[in-house]
Structure formats: C-alpha cells, structure tokens
Amino acid sequence: MNAIEEFRQETRAWLAENCPAGARGEGQVPTGSTKVQIQDPDVALWLERMVEKGWTAPTWPTEYGGGGLSTTEYVALVEEMRAIDARPALAGMGTSMIGPTLLEYGTEDQKARHLPKITRGEFAWCQGYSEPGSGSDLASLSTRAVDNGDHFVINGQKIWTSGAQYADWMFCLVRTNPDVPKHEGISFVLLPMDQRGVTVKPIRLINGLAPFCETFFDDAIAQKSDLVGELNKGWTVGKRLLQHERSGMGSLVGAQSRDPGPTLADVARDFVGTDADGRLADSVVRESLVAYEINDLAFTLTKKRTVQEADGGNTPGPATSIFKMYGTELQQEKSTLMCTIRGTQGFGWQDKDNFSEDELEWTRAWLGNRAASIYSGTNEIQRNIIAKRVLGLPD
C-alpha cells in the first residue's frame, strides 16, 4: 500500500468515527463569526474535532493551526468527506482569502496573531474593496488612510461588502498616497469591525436576501502592525488575494461547493418524464442537460488537472480568471435550467402551499446567480485579464 492510500484509509476511518450525523448533508457551516450562533451541537463538535486535526485549513503549516497536508492528501480528504456527505467544518473569507494571502505576504507577527484564530474559527472576515465609484476600476478607490503615528485613520465608504454585518475583521484596500498614479498609492490593511468609526448597512437584493452591505468609515482605526505588505504597494497584495478568491485550493477541488436540493436529472425526470427507453421524453431538455453535464465534467477535470500541476498546493496566478469566468457562467446556466425545466413551478416566490421548498429555493438561487458574473470582478474584466496576462494579447 502506498502512502496516499494509507492516508486515505486512515482518513476514512477517522471521519466515520468523528463526523457527527448533524454535520452531514445540508446545514450550517460556521464562518467563525462571533455574531452568528452555531445552532446544532453536532456542528460545534465537528468544528472542534476538525480544529484539533488542523483540517479547517488542511494545507496550511501546522505552526499556524493548519493540517500540513500535501495537495494529494487534501484531495483525498475532500473526496472522503464527500463520500459520507460531510460538510466543511469551517468556511468563509478567513480560510479562503485572507489566510492564504497572509501566508504569502504577512509578517511573522501577523501570521502568529491572525492565522491560528482563523483556523480555530474565532473570527469572521469581510472584504473592503469596491466603492460606489470604484467597481471594475478598483484602482480608482478613494477611501483614505492617513498616517497617525502607530495607526492609520480611515475615512470613506465601501459597498457590496459581503457579510459585513456578521464580520469581526475586514481586509481593506485604502489610499495612502493620493499624489502618485492610482495603482501606486494603495495600501492593504486589516481592521476590526467592532469599533466606533465603522458603520454597516445591509443592502436587500431582488431575491429578498441581504448578503451585501454598505460600510462607512468615520475616523476608523487600523494599526500599523496590520499593514500587509509595503506602504503604497497594496495593489500587488490585493490582486493576489483576488486570485485566491476566484480560485483557491478549496474551490479547485470543490471542497466548499454544495448545491441545494435535487440534481438536474432528478428534476427533469419528475417534470418531463421518460420515454419507453428510459430517456428524458423532451429532446430539447435532454440535449440541454447533456450539454451542461459535459461542460461541467470538462470544467471539473480541468480544475483537477490544475490542482495536480500546482506547485505545493499554491493557487495559480492570472489563470484563475478562467475559473471565475467559466464557473459563474456554468452556475448561471444550471440555475436557469433548474427553473426552466419546472415550467410554471419554476416561478415560485413565497407561496409554500403551491411550491415546494426546493422550487422556492431554486427561484431565489436563479435570481441571486444573476450577480455571479458581476461580483469578484465582472466576467468582462476576467476576459480582459485572460487576454492580456494569460494569452499575452496586445492592449
């Protein structure tokens, strides 16, 4: 038996013994937020056990609370968790975005202070990037951070701040020098959300949810010890974090992907029916589903190949834009098919007497997924990045 098979068998046995029933299937996945209570004791126990193993951040170094796993071991862990329908014990911007960025750009002090708290699920993080006048042209941001000795004083506004109402800390791009070209006067700072100078206002969307917020800074404070990278060189750090966001290791191996309800094929069989040969009776639906499944499988295999080719489990560079662009288009296609196949049952909103929970959930998913090609950088921006930095095409 080779080393990876031995690891897989040990992992399978440990998961079978230690993953509680309440941490399997659909349900809550903690983000570490001190403002969101863990509802199920099984979920809390699962988090505690995974923290002890270091598997809330499986590939991070053990000195920061990670598991120290290789990429191959991590893939095996994800596959074994899927086999028993185990949910991730912890998810969010701490493990997927700011943590990997601090591993690359953080000082030893920053790593020691922040990374163990992330792996233990003690804080949730949010991202302070977009502003009302700085979305696709993020480098034009105007939120100011003024040097005030051992700290910065921050004034300005961010928008579309995902989960800000539940976050304990923010990683934020701020302007520290307004007198140089826009990309050169930006710094990357960390700041606590629970302070007098930070105000959060949730934004209600068309699907009835409020995952995004406006965030206002009025003399908010970020300590100099939480400046990540060099002063006025935060654009480099900020871009790297976006690459982790668009296609981190968890995303590439599907460690955090969970779709609500039944599969496309299940829905199609229920609403379209099958012919005498067991095929879907509607040829148009059948062809649409086959095309989607082929594209989804090709995308999955491409991600797996990327993981295998990654050096030490690192997230790729500009090529992550390919995963962001194509992944969101597949996501939108799936939610559209889910609603279209259901016919009039795909338009449910609040009527629980005439629509099932799955039908209502997928209608909201369809509406919510309209934003997928906008947030984290629009698909138009991703195509520009692919053209210039992956394909090397001229401006």
Image: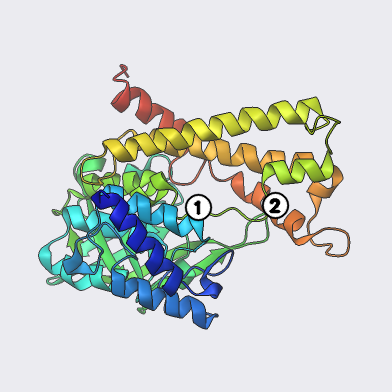
* Whole-number angstrom distance, CA of label 1 to CA of label 2: 16 Å
Of 229 and 332, nearer the camera is: 332
Q: Is residue 173 visible?
A: no
> Mark 1 or mark 2, which is nearer to you?
1
Amino acid tagged 2 = Trp
In percent of width and height, residue 70 lies at 24, 51
In percent of width and height, residue 191 lies at 29, 69
Pointer 2 local density, CA inside 10 Å: few below 14, some 14–19, many at least 20: many
Vertical relation: 268 (above or below) 148? above
Q: Spot the residue most to the bottom.
A: 41
Q: Which residue is mark 1?
A: 257
User: For residue 121, which quarter of the picture?
Assistant: bottom left
User: For residue 269, which quarter of the picture?
Assistant: top right
Pointer 1 local density, CA inside 10 Å: few below 14, some 14–19, many at least 20: few
Q: Spot the residue most to the top.
A: 394
Give the structural element (helix, strand or loop) at label 2: helix
Of 146 and 254, nearer the camera is: 254
Vertical relation: 44 (above or below) 247? below
In percent of width and height, residue 246 lies at 39, 44
Residue at (49% x, 68% y) in the render: 29
Residue at (69% x, 29% y) in the render: 288
Give the structural element (helix, strand or loop) at label 1: loop
Amino acid tagged 1 = Ser
Q: Is residue 19 left or right of residue 229?
A: right
Of 312 and 243, nearer the camera is: 312
Q: Which residue is mark 2?
A: 362
